[in-house]
Amino acid sequence: MSVAVVKLGVGNTASVLFALERLGVRAELTDDPARVADAARVILPGVGAAAYAARVLRDRGLDEVLRRFQRPLLGICLGQQLLFERSEEGDARGLGLLSGDVAALPNSRAWPSPHMGWSRLSECQPHPLLEGVAGAYMYFVHSFACPVDEHTIASAEYGRPFAAAVARGNVFGCQFHPERSGAAGARVLANFMALPC
């Protein structure tokens, strides 16, 4: 099975590739639109600025490829945020695969931004992506967060509730980093690999 990890030039691609390798999955890091379009599964990772990442997707013609992609697509961290319509961070335009805007987390003494560390998942609705990890603690690093809505399958809290995992059709997202979340995170990646095409 071919797995493409989208090369954005930002963030956590090496740790995602290593996490997949530990599961016995060989993935290709690529920014070639044809390779992404032909993959059986695509992972859109990212750490960094939404406006920059969105521009990279547009400049390389990957935005339209991802919008048309019909097989399982997983956004991780910034990758999940890019699945939405817009981000307050740099007024970035996302892929629009999920409705809503990504907004800044609160920043205060009680809740300093960014949110860095382990937070517990609260299941909003059962979904195969989160099979076996309900209530698990996952590792987060982010300053912006996606809205909780009908496509939220798990939420977490940091000053306010936010979407920790989302699903709509063939589109999935994790605000947390499964590749840095130990056994529970590895289970999420294995679950993603097991989703039907």
Image (cartoon, rainbow, N blue to C red):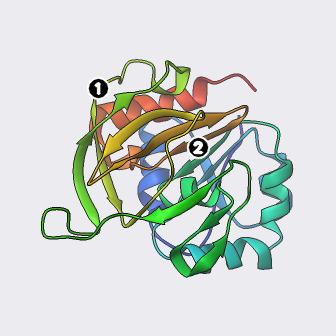
Q: Which mark is residue 26?
A: 2
Residue type, numbered disc 2: Arg
Residue tagged 1: 135
Image quadrant where one finds the C terminus = top right
Badge 2 element: loop
Furthest toward the left, the residue is 109
Q: Residues within 10 Å of mark 2 (few under 14, many from 20)?
A: some
**26 on left or right of 38:** left
Q: Where's residue 84, x and y in %?
A: 64, 55
Q: Is residue 193 above or below residue 102?
A: above
Residue type, numbered disc 1: Gly
Q: Where's residue 190, x and y in %?
A: 49, 29
Closer mark to the observer between disc 2 and disc 1: 1
Q: CA distance from mark 2 to mark 1?
A: 29 Å
Nearest the eye: 131 or 153: 153
Badge 1 element: loop
Q: Where's residue 166, x and y in %?
A: 55, 38
